[in-house]
Image (spheres, helix red, strand yellow):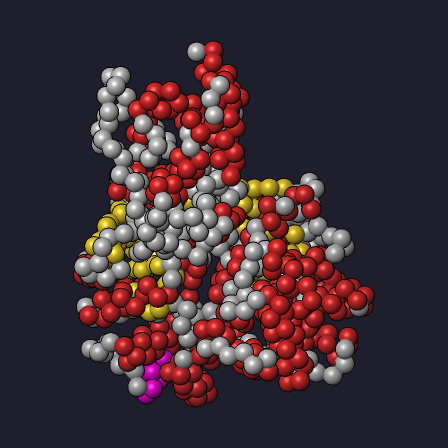
Amino acid sequence: MSPLPAHPSADAVLDGLDPEQREVAANPSGPMVVLAGAGTGKTRAITHRIAYAVLSGAQQPQRTLAVTFTARAAGEMRTRLRDLGVGGVQARTFHAAALRQLHYFWPQAIGGAAPEVMPHKAGAVAEAAGRLRLRFDRTGLRDLAAEVEWAKVSMLTAETYAAAARGAGREAPGLDLTAMSRVITAYEEVKAERGVIDFEDVLLVLAGILDENDTVARAVREQYRSFVVDEYQDVNALQQRLLDLWLADRDDICVVGDPAQTIYSFTGASPVHLLGFRSRHPGARQVELVRNYRSTPEIVGLANLVLRSPSGGRRSGSVVLEAQRATGVVPSLVQHSDDPAEAAAVAAQVADLIADGSAPADVAVLFRTNGQSELVESALADRGIPYLVRGGERFFQRREVREAIVLMRGAARSDDGSVPLPDLVRDVLLGAGWSRDAPAAGGASRERWESLTSLAALADDVFAADGEARMPAFVRELDERMASQHAPAVQGVTLASLHAAKGLEWGTVFLIGCSDGYLPISMADTPEAIEEERRLLYVGVTRARDRLVLSWSGARTPGARATRRPSRFLDGTASILGEGARSQPKRSSRVGGAAGTKGPKVRRRSTCRTCGADLETAGERTVGRCASCPATYDEATFDRLREWRLATARSASVPAYVVFTDATLTAIAEQTPADLAALSSISGVGQRKLDLYASQVLAVLSGETPESVVAAAEDY
């Protein structure tokens, strides 16, 4: 196909992009993988890439499919492309794109009308469990549905589930793996009897049609010639399979993602597709977006430290962010006596920010688990501060919003242009029970007012963009947003879990519960799971633009014994957050004095740093972790330490435990001390061990090979 003529404004699309963004946009053909750090303008880069491809004649808009993971992101992409003068590009979620194709090709490939898609699995899962005489409460059913979903996105059947789940280290919720297989079988039977499919079936069935029906496959591939995939680190096996079938043997694909923001592995997502892209597409261009435009240098610096390995390298294949903004407020870490005190302190700081002019919608309180929000909600309500819990009822499904839109449709038919759009929308809202002033009460009435007020604010935005806009245009805008669930912003402090906060940003972020047991969560029982918890903290830190306050509390309830410690993920951040960030406090005494001088006795940890349980044995207290909790060290680091210990023991003709016991070596691997003071704080590392081995241990931890360390010590 010959290229289309270039539009005169094509080169202008590249103006204003930084060098890396420009490289992404100016090379719209062929395979490309973009490793985009947080706040580096990835959406800007890929939308300009699509716009440049279309305006330069390299691609046709209707032949381009941009795929992302949320309806909000897809809506934002369409809005930006429209602002760049490019229409016709399909920007959709995986499920929306697949469902559209399935409805279109079902009559041709299978016959008749496509089956209804169940909006939720819970009812069918409950019936399946009931047939097996299994009883679960609502929470249990939700967990059961999530396990069914994991099996399906991993392309497993009831017959292959148990072995795969066992290999992945998964545990079925309240069942053994064989019983879970029976639940999957019963669930599929329930769907078949009801004549419905679920959202995973949409992808599975479409993939099956494309794989088996050459006519349909050719039609789809003729329609879409070029692909852009956002948030590619979150792709699961099923989505990758569908993408491969869409693409076939072509290579016009650009994938964008950040391996440091892989936080959905429990749903089947894996960064392996992102990190292995170039092995599947030899010759693919790789671009790293590293210039962070979102956050202050202080916040960027903290984010980089969270992901820095003991040897100074990067974890998870992440990029090192480079701050582009001016100096700002240094992030802080605050300790509180208990959870209620922490919530009250956060509410007080939020009240001060609002009094100083900050908009409530520009403030967020983030947490690891949804159960942490209750105390914060109460504390904010006590001060009359409006808030919204992200992840609740969808905006366009709220009753007051649906009723207001019905009234807008009626007003659109009688709009004679005599009243400006913002005033007309407010008149309609007044008829729906809205008031211009916020209600004095909080709770549901305040949330209702905030929802309707956001419609008024959206009318202002539409009118600002087009001074001639009338009510019919506003209703069309609402319809488009409703179809993509691209809701307008609602005023109020945002309360959100770290998972729900991904992809969002606020001027001020309070990150509560920064203690072991929450970060990492006590259920994280493998090195991979613990690293994902670290990435969750990174996601939380990088949500903040201007101010970041981290906090933790020593106990759950007032008066209880303080058994918690700061998150181990903050151990390397003392240069920004201060010495209080260390999960094992730094010794204050001078290390390395005259021979024979004894330092203060090291107080061994009495509770497990992971689960908080009392430590029973001396070995457990040395390591700081109970025997039932998994090790948290980097395996490569621990292997280097063991190799060094063995070589050192052989050189001195002593047993290995004489150099360091297993418990002490494990503690060193887990705490990765960066200097003499930190090393000396570990139980089992006395003055004599420091004199003999300190420099060698620190060298091994910094990445030097055990052989070179031992050889250098012998030469010395």
Residue at position x 53%, y 42% from top? 317
Q: Is residue 419 above or below residue 250?
A: below
Rendering coords of residue 264 (x, y %):
51, 58
Q: Quadrant of residue 296?
A: top left
How many badges with numbers are in the image? 0
Q: Is residue 685 visible?
A: yes
Front position in the image: 110 or 422? 110
Residue at position x 33%, y 34% from top? 682
618 lies left or right of 48: left
Front position in the image: 547 or 712? 712
Q: Is residue 550 above or below residue 144?
A: above
Dominant secondary structure of the residues highlighted in magenta in the image: helix
462 lies left or right of 115: left
Locate the C terminus and report the quarter of the image it occupies: top left
Residue at position x 25%, y 19% from top? 596
Q: Is residue 225 visible?
A: no
Front position in the image: 399 or 45? 399
Residue 539, magenta (yes or no)? no
Rendering coords of residue 395 (x, y %):
42, 74
Q: What is the magenta range?
A: 424-432
Rendering coords of residue 336 (x, y %):
22, 53
Q: Is residue 31 above or below residue 660?
A: below
Rendering coords of residue 329 (x, y %):
26, 45
Residue 425, magenta (yes or no)? yes
47 lies left or right of 405: right
Residue at position x 30%, y 86% from top? 433
Q: Quadrant of residue 489?
A: bottom left
Front position in the image: 581 or 109? 581
Q: Quadrant of residue 307?
A: top left
